[in-house]
Image (spheres, rainbow, N blue to C red):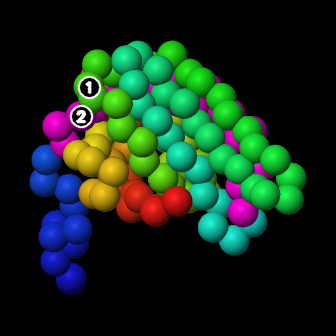
Amino acid sequence: FPDYERVLPKSHPHTVALDREDFRAAIERVSQFSDERSRAIKIRFADDEATIHSSLSESGESEESLAVDYGGPTTEIGFNATYLLEFLRAVGEPRVRFHFKDPQSAGELTPAGEDLNYRYRYVVMPMRI
């Protein structure tokens, strides 16, 4: 087997707790204005708020804000919306955690449940937008 542990993030100084369904729905709505090929969106984490933004020169732009549990520095990271939605549609927990280091490092999504009988990690690479 390949050494998969090399690609897993080693540390995540910042964690955001989100409502899974609200996050999924916001990404689906905002990504309607993203490029069909790249599906690029920007997520800006600030004090207890996540702002999801996308724009397309031909059709306009979209932005939506969500209340989240976050108290770290303001950080803006680009992602492919399709990859985030894959995780959010698959996980059954009502809340999820998004762990990250900085806008250039891999992020990690996990279910936020305390009494889980499994450990599910979804690693997603950021995009330059």
Disc ID at residue 72: 1
The spot of residue 71 in percent (x, y) is 28, 19
Disc ID at residue 54: none
- Identity of the amino acid at label 2? His
The spot of residue 29 in percent (x, y) is 75, 39
Residue 69 left/right relative to 64: left
Residue 86 visible somewhere in the drawing: no
Q: Residue furthest right?
A: 59
The spot of residue 15 in percent (x, y) is 28, 32
Residue 129 left/right relative to 58: left
Residue 91 visible somewhere in the drawing: yes
The spot of residue 69 in percent (x, y) is 37, 18
Which quarter of the figure has residue 114? top left
- Label 2 sits on a secondary structure element that is strand
- Label 1 sits on a secondary structure element that is loop
In magenta segment, residue 83: no
How busy is the neighbourhood of tag 1: few (under 14 within 10 Å), some, or many (20 plus)? some
Residue 87 left/right relative to 34: left
Kindly identify which residue carries mark 2: 14
Q: Residue at x 41, y 58 (%)?
A: 126
How busy is the neighbourhood of tag 2: few (under 14 within 10 Å), some, or many (20 plus)? some
**Circles 2 and 1: CB distance less than 8 Å?**
yes
Up-down: is 80 above or below 53? Answer: below
Which stretch appears magenta?
Answer: 12-35
Tell which circle, 2 or 1, labels the residue nearer the N-terminal end. 2
Up-down: is 6 above or below 41? Answer: below
Q: Residue at x 22, y 61 (%)?
A: 8
Q: Residue furthest front?
A: 57
